[in-house]
Amino acid sequence: MNRNTKINLVLLLVVAALAVLPLALGLGDHKEEPFTGADAQAETAITELDPDYEPWFTPLYEPPSAEIESALFALQAAIGAGVLAYYFGLRRGRRQGEERATARQQAADADAVGVPGKSPADGA
Amino acid sequence: MHIAEGFLPPAHAVAWGVASAPFVVHGVRSLTREVREHPESTLLLGASGAFTFVLSALKLPSVTGSCSHPTGTGLGAILFRPPIMAVLGTITLLFQALLLAHGGLTTLGANVFSMAIVGPWAGYAVYKVLRRYDVPLMAAVFCGAFVADLSTYCVTSVQLALAFPDPGSGFLGALGKFASIFAVTQIPLAVSEGLLTVLVMRLLVQSSKGELTRLGVLLAGKRSRTETEAVAR
């Protein structure tokens, strides 16, 4: 594994650790409902600050259950991850194709002037 | 982070919508110009939008014992400048408001203002200043993404405190309350976002040197070569 890949893996590991530590250390234990969304807590805070406040508009569509909601969140993440993977896959493929083409070209040039060059790129 | 549907009084909702609209309109213009003049950047634009999509779908636990999610707007702001991120961020917020009942249409203006306008601009400003003082690329990217993420939630806190000042301690009292919910929770998540943005930027430096040079992220000179080598080593 080269140094580059190692650094990338360390970055991912630190992110994972940052997500797992609050759970592992039980940082939500002091709450009645640990690890709820900050936006839901903000709603509670609003009702504390202004007990008379009534939301004056409701979402046009609301996922009927927590399962459907998590499915839609997963869909959102999947779309994003898919596009990112497509981008990097395409870039990698293009770069490899270019490298092969250059190698082939060089080999062809070498053949043309009669210098024994490397055979065309393997598996090209 | 998003303010839930109906949770801003109508006057505030309209005001934030009016404040955000010009940025988004300007952003749409920048985006169409970018795509027309550099059709080859469409793919990277898509990737920047995709990054926001992934990150804002990831609800992560934090030290305060509650969950929140990163925004992913720093990357696109650094690559394509903040106006374009205003559009990509708005698309993400619309998706969440319409399909997930996360955020809302009446609070869209306020949420766009925090996540798609202030976040990208603040992150971009920090990145630019650090680069001017020759801070290494990846350190500047980390700080930019960190600030883009955290400033978004600070703005959300201000927006809510303006709408719901504390009966006793007023605006500042409410600000403290909302900031302790949003901003403190967000600090470790902003670190995560910074690290993930650095990761994606490293992959981009390896795979899309030409594109990054054209966008001015890598300089076409000696300095950029040493930086590329530092990553490629």
Image (cartoon, helix red, strand yellow):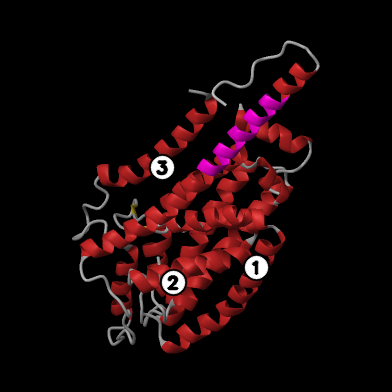
Name the secondary structure under disc 3: helix
Instruction: State the residue at coordinates (64%, 52%).
Output: B127
The answer to whether residue A120 is above or below residue B197 is above
Instruction: State the residue at coordinates (32%, 84%).
Output: A55
Residue highlighted by disc 3: A15
Front position in the image: B205 or B4: B205
Residue highlighted by disc 1: B32
User: Total number of numbered labels?
Assistant: 3
Q: Position of residue B39 (x, y in %)?
A: 66, 58
Q: Amino acid at mark 1?
A: Thr
Q: Are marks 2 and 1 in contact (CB under 8 Å)?
A: no
The answer to whether residue B153 is above or below residue A47 is above
Point out the frontmost of discs 2 and 1.
1
Instruction: State the residue at coordinates (61%, 30%).
Output: B232
User: Which label number is shown at residue B194?
Assistant: none
Residue highlighted by disc 2: B94
**Is residue B182 at all visible to an observer of this figure?**
yes
Q: CA distance from mark 3 to mark 1?
A: 35 Å
The span shown in magenta is A89-105
Name the secondary structure under disc 2: helix
Q: Position of residue B18 (x, y in %)?
A: 55, 83
Q: CA distance from mark 3 to mark 2?
A: 27 Å
